[in-house]
Image: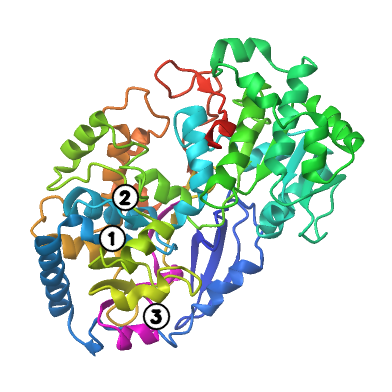
Amino acid sequence: MAVVRSLCGQCGVGCGIRAVTGEGREARIEGDPVHPANSGLLCTRSEALKDMLALDGRLLRPMVDGRAVGWDRAIDQATRRLASVIARHGPGSVAMHVPGGLLTEDYYVANKLMKGFIGSAHIDAPASAAGGMAAAQRAAFGEDVMPAAYEDLAQADMLLLVGEATARRHPVLHERIAEARAEQGARLVLIARTDEGQEVEADERLTVAPGSEAALLSGLLLHCYDHGVLDRDFLNRNLLVPPDFWVGLRRGHDLWSVARACGLAPGEVRGFYERVAVMPRLVTLFSPHGAGEAGQRLSAAILNFHLATGRIGKPCAAPFAVTDAANGMGAREVGCRAGELAAHRDFSIEALAQVGRFWGAAALADRPGLSGAALADAIEAGRIKALLMPGGLPSASHPIRGLLEQVPLIILTTPWNEPEVETLRMIALPAPVWIEKDGTLTGADRLISRQRWLFPLPGEAKPDWWIMTRIAQAMGWRDAFHYERPAEIYREHVRLTAYRNEGARLLNLKRHAPISNPAYDELTPWRWGEVPFDEGRFPTPDGKARLVAFWDQDS
């Protein structure tokens, strides 16, 4: 019998678990009472871990075109076919889809392989679902940084919850909100949609038309502007306000326009504004509805409000975007998305030079790639000739799932022996389920924790990072892909965040640059960034945050 402290990994919260393993693949799993993300709480999503105990339906040997082969032959076939595609059609014909459930070390190797050595930035990843929020944070703060932490909930006087689904999809978060109300007297104000249920108990509920949340919150900022509730000192010292921002904000965000858009009486809207505007210790919790314009508008409206009223850079006042993807934050940290390079760097000339030099890149991608619907269109048009899929197949509803037959080469790492493994022409390589993974994960509030395997890998399964490392080595890039254990990847990722980073980016993990293998194995949860922006300085060229006039994007 052994006791293992690990992670649930079934959503973006990053809850810790305490597992007692027995003979065979038996385990008793409970919440870890000392983990900061959940303090012993667990929700029903953790039941999925028990479903991983049995080996039914597992892929336990490499498969090439439906036939079982050894690892050497599988890697040889993968690299020969991939090299042929690149030689004939160029790096832009290669794309990657990552369905989620990978650790930071997996994402790091995948991103480095694609962007630094294959030369393509076509990556569709779960972090893309938070693309609107990430884009809004980069526009406002200069970097994709989540300013809040779960501990903030216990110190706030008011919790503004945007969307009932935000709490419903994250029961542990819901429990922490309930604790804050019961123990600290925090007031919960819920902005619900008319198409949602009424499962979340709140001190005040405002039910609005779907899609009107951004208008409501922009109207809140206008109310603060008109009634002298802005933090003028913070605004003048730490913010850059676009020309005519307040004139543009007034269009469509006056009390009467907002009331019509939300389907509310003007008096309801005014009362909501007056109660929220006077609460300095306020945390706004929201889910960024998708990767597109709606998510960016909602995120920008919330960030604008918190910045202009000085409700940021404090332990109990911040916007808090809660995403569904497990380790979506880790994927964004290493840049495993189509629009970023690595370690919160963009595709600027300076960033390309830094990352290319650090990696010793053979063929560095020099521009953002395709993801989501745009990538699906490229597959349908026949422009994508090879698709790398570390972590498994897309969900049944994903637009790429129905297009797999149109891709000449698929290299898949997966725990499951799904029908496509035998029916499609692909190279399928056996990978771990969550309880067999070993590495790190970053929760939604920048908390890095250790995921430790509960059981050794069955059959011939190998970690995702190991598989991609062996492919890279066989492609001729052995010097850049020398990894034998996840601690080595973690150290390289840490060093990349610190490389040529003289305060330009908050993501700087340099304190762990010299971490030893034993120290990595015993790593306890830690949060990078401390309290972001607590000195009023932001990672922009002039050190100031920006209010984002998202309505200028209408045309």
Three-letter residue code for mark 2:
Gly
Q: Work out whether mark 3 precedes mark 2 in sequence or the reverse, and give the earlier one.
A: 2
Residue named by callout 3: 416
Residue 461 in percent (x, y) is at: 30, 76
Q: Which stretch did the figure color magenta?
A: 415-441
Measure how far apart labels 3 and 2 are at the Cα level: 28 Å
Q: Quadrant of residue 497?
A: top left
Is residue 186 in view from this perspective?
no
Secondary structure category for the residue under label 2: loop
Measure how far apart labels 2 and 1 are at the Cα level: 9 Å
Q: Residues within 10 Å of mark 1 (few under 14, many from 20)?
A: many
- Residue drawn at point x = 65 percent, y = 20 percent: 246
Q: In this view, does 238 lie above or below 351?
A: above
Three-letter residue code for mark 1:
Ala
Residue named by callout 1: 95
Name the one closer to the observer, 534 or 205. Answer: 205
Three-letter residue code for mark 3:
Trp
Residue 307 in percent (x, y) is at: 62, 24
Residue named by callout 2: 369
Q: In which quarter of the image is residue 269?
A: top right
Name the one closer to the observer, 278 or 17. Answer: 278
Q: Is residue 328 magenta?
A: no
Q: Work out whether mark 1 precedes mark 3 in sequence or the reverse, and give the earlier one.
A: 1
Q: In this view, does 537 lie above or below 452?
A: above
